[in-house]
Amino acid sequence: MGIEFNELFDQWAESYDSTVAGLDLEYQDVFAGYKDILENVAARSAGFVVEFGVGTGNLTEKLMDGGMEVYGVEPSKGMREKVRRKFPELQLADGHFLEFPVPEEQVDTVVSTYAFHHLTDDEKGKALVQFHQLLGPNGKIVFADTVFVTELAKEAKIDEAEQKGFFRLARDLRTEYYSTIPNLMDLFYAAGFEVKFEQQNDFVWLMEAAKKER
């Protein structure tokens, strides 16, 4: 359920910002247009926001600059320490997509960037059901993450990475739980959401899902 990656993110906390800035050649395409992606997520968010996978607080900053109140959930101790230094006033909880202290406030938007793939598709479905219960009327989800149009498209990206000698990226694409648009559409719909997808770069898609009242 994502917590198996905590050690990796504890180690990555100090260098994460340089990676997303494009200084790691293997991941340049994954993080292409990173700032624009964060701005697109923030622009579609509103009200009281729960952010999963806060990381070093890059999206958090844009949400707060937009006047939103943010409740952050982050499983990595290293990342929590990093973001607390940047935003000591932030409400920040130790938790993950499936287990977290529920805020007392009514939640208007659930957001996340580059993190939902840490869950298997079964776990993604369970998380989305929880978010439907968590969100208030007219609530929505705004995620940006690596997603593939089909499994064949995913395999093609793995082959491309290996041909370039990007073996860390290829291993990442094989071992983490990157899903496809058809699978995710089914999961969002089953959980009570209408969802639309907007491509951000060669890897990342923005998912905006509006809550349907049952």
Image (tube, rainbow, N blue to C red):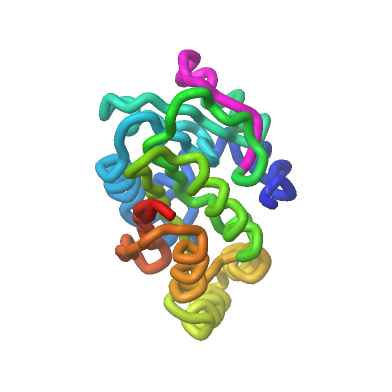
Q: From the viewer's perspective, is residue 61 above or below residue 199?
A: above
Tell me which corner region of the image, top left, top right, bottom left or bottom right, holds residue 118. bottom right
Task: Tell me if 11 is positioned left or right of 147 in this view.
Answer: right
Q: Name the residue at 67% across, 40% down.
A: 99
Res 193 quadrant in image: bottom left
- Inspect this view and state whether residue 78 appears: no
Compared to residue 171, the image places residue 47 above or below, namely: above
Q: Which residue is more in the foreground, 164 or 72?
A: 72
Residue at (53% x, 81% y) in the render: 151
Q: Is residue 57 above or below residue 130?
A: above
Pinpoint residue 18: horizontal percent, then vertical percent: 47, 41
Residue 175 position, x and y percent, is 67, 66
Asked whether 92 falls inside the magenta stretch, the response is yes
Q: Residue at x 50, y 82 (%)?
A: 156
For the C terminus, the quadrant is bottom left
Question: What's drawn in magenta, residue-wise?
Answer: 84-96
